[in-house]
Amino acid sequence: DYNHALLTAGCDVLAVTHPLAHINLHIEGKLNHRTLSNWGSWDWVAGMRMRALFERWRPDAVICHGNRALQIASLSKYHAPIISVTHNYHLKHLAKANFAFALTQDLASKAVAAGMPESKVFRIPNMIAT
C-alpha cells in the first residue's frame, strides 16, 4: 500500500483513520497512526482536529482515500498539497484536491472530464500489499 511504499522510500508517514475503520486491525510496523472521529464530510470540528495533527506533523503532502477524507482535509485549510485517490466515479469533491491518483485509465479520463487538469492526474494502480 502507499504507507508501505512511502516507508520503504524513507518517508515519514502518518496514517489517519476513523476509530472504527477495519484497516486499523492491520496497521503494524513503523507506521505512525492516529484516529480521528467525525460526524460526516461537513464536520468542521474534525477539520480543525485534522489541522492540529497537520501542524504537529507538518506533512509535505496529504493523500486522501475517499470523499469524506478529502472534505475533512480541505476543511483543515492546511497548506500542503492534497492528493485525492479516485477509487470510484463519485468525483464531485475532486476540485478540492491539488492532484489526483487515478486507479484506472478510465478514472483518469473521468477526473479530467470533471475539471482536474490532465497534468495533475496520475495513473497509479491500487497499491495493495499481498
Image: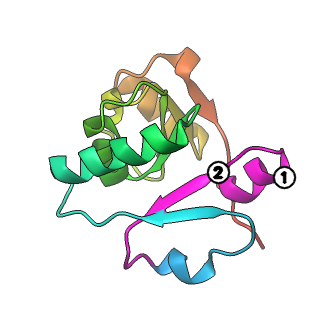
Tag of residue 130: none
Name the residue beneath numbered marker 1.
8
Region in magenta: 1-21
Question: Dot 2: few (<14), some (14–19), or many (≥20) neighbours within 10 Å?
Answer: some
Residue 51 shown in magenta: no
Which mark is first along the chain, 1 or 2? Answer: 1
Residue drawn at (57%, 15%), measured in percent from left and top?
Answer: 119
Q: Describe residue 56's horizontal placement relative to residue 70 as left or right.
A: right
Residue at left 83%, top 45%?
Answer: 9
Judge by depth and name the residue closer to the eye, 66 or 32: 32
> In the displayed structure, does residue 26 sit left or right of residue 20?
right
Give residue 13's position: percent from left, percent from top: 65, 51
Q: Residues within 10 Å of mark 1 (few under 14, many from 20)?
A: few
Q: Amino acid at mark 1?
A: Thr
Q: Which residue is mark 2?
A: 13
Measure the alpha-carbon separation of dots 2 and 1.
10 Å
